[in-house]
Image (cartoon, helix red, strand yellow):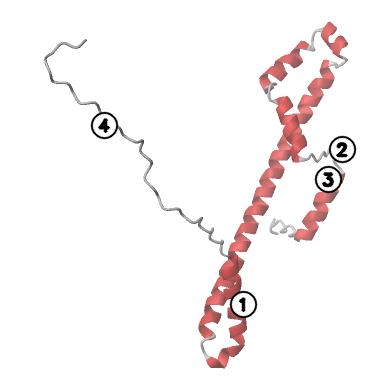
């Protein structure tokens, strides 16, 4: 008897989306933020590096401080532990997303290669009058390729370069070469 493990069922993109939505609905705190909200929170956190925050949490161990702030040390430590565990989830989710994005790039490359190859073969075959049905397709691809090219920026008309105006020169006074004393 062999101990083969059955291959897990491969999910379709639609099934992955459904599963992600189910998982998201089961997480207590999922807080989508706008880009502006993220920026504001990051600005508020900037002057508080992690080592400073961690050392400040230790101050809560002093009974007077914990009572004055209304934040028991155990609660803050639990929040800290929860943050570390959810950061691990975010890291794993980012890795998952990068994997999906990478696979999509490979898919796009494969599709582009097949399409480019089809156009090249079609363009060659369209030269044969017996394959006239290909001509409109080839012409449409040519039109779309031209339309997709970046437009050249119109050059501003250049004015002829004129030499910089030189100030009017007045002749320098003649050098007095006489030996008579000057008054």
Label 1 vs 2, first from the N-terminus: 2
User: Quick one: label 1, few (<14), some, or many (20+) residues within 10 Å?
Assistant: few
Q: Residue tagged by mark 4?
A: 171
x%, y% of residue 47?
68, 21
x%, y% of residue 16?
77, 55
> Please, what secondary structure does the residue beneath circle 3 have?
helix
Rendered-image quadrant of the N terminus: bottom right
Label 3 vs 1, first from the N-terminus: 3
Q: Is residue 109 left or right of residue 171?
A: right
User: Which residue shows up at 83% across the image and 55% down it?
Assistant: 18
* Residue 115 in view, yes or no: yes
Q: Nearer the viewer, residue 136 or 20?
A: 136
Labelled pair 4, 2 in contact (Cβ < 8 Å): no
Mark drawn on residue 85: none
| Cα gap from disc 3 to disc 1, whole angstroms | 44 Å
Q: Residue tagged by mark 3?
A: 24
User: Which residue shows up at 62% across the image and 83% down it?
Assistant: 136
User: Which residue shows up at 84% across the image and 21% down it?
Assistant: 75
Q: Nearer the viewer, mark 1 or mark 4?
A: 4
Label 1 vs 4, first from the N-terminus: 1
User: Which residue shows up at 82% across the image and 16% down it?
Assistant: 73
| Cα gap from disc 1 to disc 4, whole angstroms | 74 Å
| Cα gap from disc 1 to disc 2, whole angstroms | 52 Å
> Please, what secondary structure does the residue beneath circle 4 have?
loop
x%, y% of residue 163?
36, 45
Label 4 vs 3, first from the N-terminus: 3
> Please, what secondary structure does the residue beneath circle 2 have?
loop
Q: Residue tagged by mark 1?
A: 140
* Residue 114 in view, yes or no: no
| Cα gap from disc 4 to disc 2, whole angstroms | 90 Å
């Amino acid at each position: 008897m062999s101990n083969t493990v059955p291959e897990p069922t491969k999910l379709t993109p639609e099934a992955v989306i459904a599963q992600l939505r189910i998982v998201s609905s089961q997480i207590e705190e999922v807080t989508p933020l706008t880009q502006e909200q993220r920026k504001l929170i990051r600005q508020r956190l900037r002057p508080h590096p992690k080592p400073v925050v961690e050392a400040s949490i230790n101050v809560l161990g002093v009974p007077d401080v914990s009572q004055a702030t209304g934040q028991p040390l155990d609660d803050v430590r639990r929040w800290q532990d929860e943050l570390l565990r959810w950061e691990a989830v975010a890291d794993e989710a980012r890795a998952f997303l990068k994997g999906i994005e990478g696979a999509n790039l490979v898919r796009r490359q494969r599709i582009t290669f097949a399409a480019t190859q089809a156009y090249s073969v079609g363009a060659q075959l369209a030269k044969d009058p017996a394959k006239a049905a290909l001509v409109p397709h080839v012409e449409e691809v040519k039109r779309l390729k031209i339309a997709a090219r970046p437009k050249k920026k119109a050059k501003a008309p250049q004015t002829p370069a004129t030499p910089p105006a030189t100030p009017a020169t007045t002749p320098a006074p003649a050098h007095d070469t006489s030996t008579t004393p000057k008054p």
